[in-house]
Image: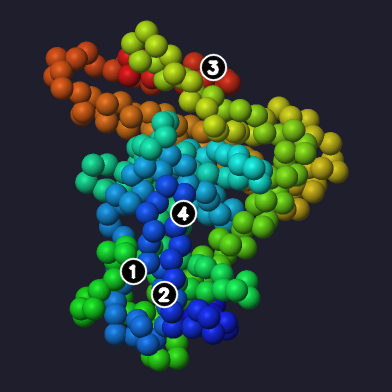
């Protein structure tokens, strides 16, 4: 992991990065000169993620994430990619409560690695950066040090840097795998239904693996998918769909916690309607 970029244009200079929908943050290159006497904290409040309906996952973290989170695939102009499903409507993350507490057992890498990020310098090399506006950096004696000495990152920082590099490596393999899955017709829409009194709302924008087509796949493409580690990913996504029930329960509790009418009737239990993954949240 390079702490200093090779290109002098970025040497010692802060620069800014902003993702879609976010305000501009001050992202600076990690350096001993800038951060040698500073400390950082691991995130305990996840309010920054409160509006994230989806979050992209690295392939390496999927086996752990599937144990407690519903996984799906999303799609943009570049193709399909694996995500954690965190809510049913845009702008609402059901896994973050009003106090900023994370409600699931597994915390995705892109959340728990804050305040660190990777960026590319003009030579397309990854460099380790930190979000100065994250509220997780301090000049007091508390927290974790950035550096063990002026030439070496502290062990905690090195570990996060290695995980972020693995995530970036996963992106390429993920894109290759998803193209292969798509070429073999293995993606299908995963539609959920939210019932609000007499109105039914279709929750779209998610895709899942078509298990029937996967089981019927010819030997050659099946071996190619397995070579890329894709079989684990396919079945992880399918097995993880059970966790959407827990997400629905959180939605129910959140709904009634914000309902002024204390005499409102209780919400009926979440029910999987059929094998197509259509889920009904009665009276929500």
Q: How far apart are marks 2 and 3 (CA)?
A: 53 Å
Q: Residue 266, how many percent across, how many down?
A: 24, 16
Q: Which of marks 4 and 1 is nearer the N terminus?
A: 4
Left or right position of 207 against 103: right
Q: Earlier in the sequence, mark 4 or mark 2?
A: 2
Label 2, residues with CA under 10 Å away: few <14, some 14-19, many ≥20? some
Residue 68: image x %, image y %?
A: 43, 43
Q: Mark 2 points at which residue?
A: 14
Splitting the image into 4 quarters, where does residue 53 fall? top left
| Residue at mark 1 to residue at mark 2: CA–CA distance | 10 Å
Q: Name the residue under label 3.
A: 274
Q: How many marks?
A: 4
Q: Which residue lies furthest to the front in this view?
A: 9
> For the residues marked 4 and 2, what is the alpha-carbon distance in whole angstroms?
17 Å
Q: How far apart are marks 4 and 1 (CA)?
A: 15 Å
- Of badges 3 and 4, nearer the viewer stands 4
Q: Which residue is drawn at 20% across and 23% down?
A: 259
| Crowd around label 1: few <14 · some 14–19 · many ≥20 (10 Å) | some
The secondary element bearing badge 2 is classed as loop
Name the quadrant containing residue 153.
bottom left
Identify the image's colour scheme: rainbow, by chain, secondary structure or one colour: rainbow
Q: Which numbered disc flags the more N-terminal residue, 1 or 3?
A: 1
Q: Which secondary structure lies at badge 3?
A: loop
Answer few, some or many: residues within 10 Å of disc 3's Cα (few below 14, many 20 plus, some between 14 and 19).
few
Residue sitting at x 61%, y 41%: 76
Q: Which residue is denoted by mark 1 in the rendering?
A: 132
Q: Mark 4 points at which residue?
A: 19
Q: Identify the residue at image location x=51%, y=20%.
A: 278
The answer to the question of whether label 1 and label 2 lie on touching residues, with beta carbons closer than 8 A, is yes
In the picture, which quadrant includes the N terminus?
bottom right
């Amino acid at each position: 992991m390079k702490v200093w970029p090779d290109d002098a244009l970025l040497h010692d200079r802060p620069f800014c990065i902003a993702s879609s929908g976010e305000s501009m943050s001050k992202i600076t290159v990690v350096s001993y000169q800038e951060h040698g006497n500073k400390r950082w904290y691991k995130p305990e409040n996840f309010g920054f993620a409160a509006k994230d309906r989806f979050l992209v996952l690295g392939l390496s973290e999927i086996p752990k994430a599937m144990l407690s989170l519903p996984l799906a695939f999303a799609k943009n102009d570049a193709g399909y990619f694996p995500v954690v499903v965190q809510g049913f409507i845009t702008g609402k993350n059901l896994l973050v409560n009003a106090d900023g507490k994370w409600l699931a057992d597994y915390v995705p890498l892109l959340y728990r690695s804050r305040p660190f990020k990777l960026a590319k310098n003009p030579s397309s090399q990854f460099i380790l950066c930190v979000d100065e506006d994250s509220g997780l950096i301090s000049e007091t004696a508390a927290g974790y040090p950035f550096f063990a000495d002026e030439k070496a990152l502290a062990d905690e920082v090195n570990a996060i840097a290695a995980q972020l590099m693995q995530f970036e490596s996963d992106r390429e393999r993920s894109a290759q795998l998803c193209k292969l899955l798509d070429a073999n017709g293995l993606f299908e829409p995963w539609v959920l239904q939210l019932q609000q009194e007499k109105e039914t709302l279709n929750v779209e924008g998610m895709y899942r693996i078509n298990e029937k087509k996967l089981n019927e796949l010819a030997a050659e493409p099946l071996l190619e998918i397995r070579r890329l580690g894709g079989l684990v990913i396919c079945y992880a996504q399918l097995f993880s769909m059970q966790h959407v029930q827990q997400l629905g329960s959180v939605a129910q509790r959140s709904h009634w916690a914000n309902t002024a009418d204390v005499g409102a009737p209780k919400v009926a239990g979440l029910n999987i309607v059929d094998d197509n993954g259509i889920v009904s949240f009665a009276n929500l």
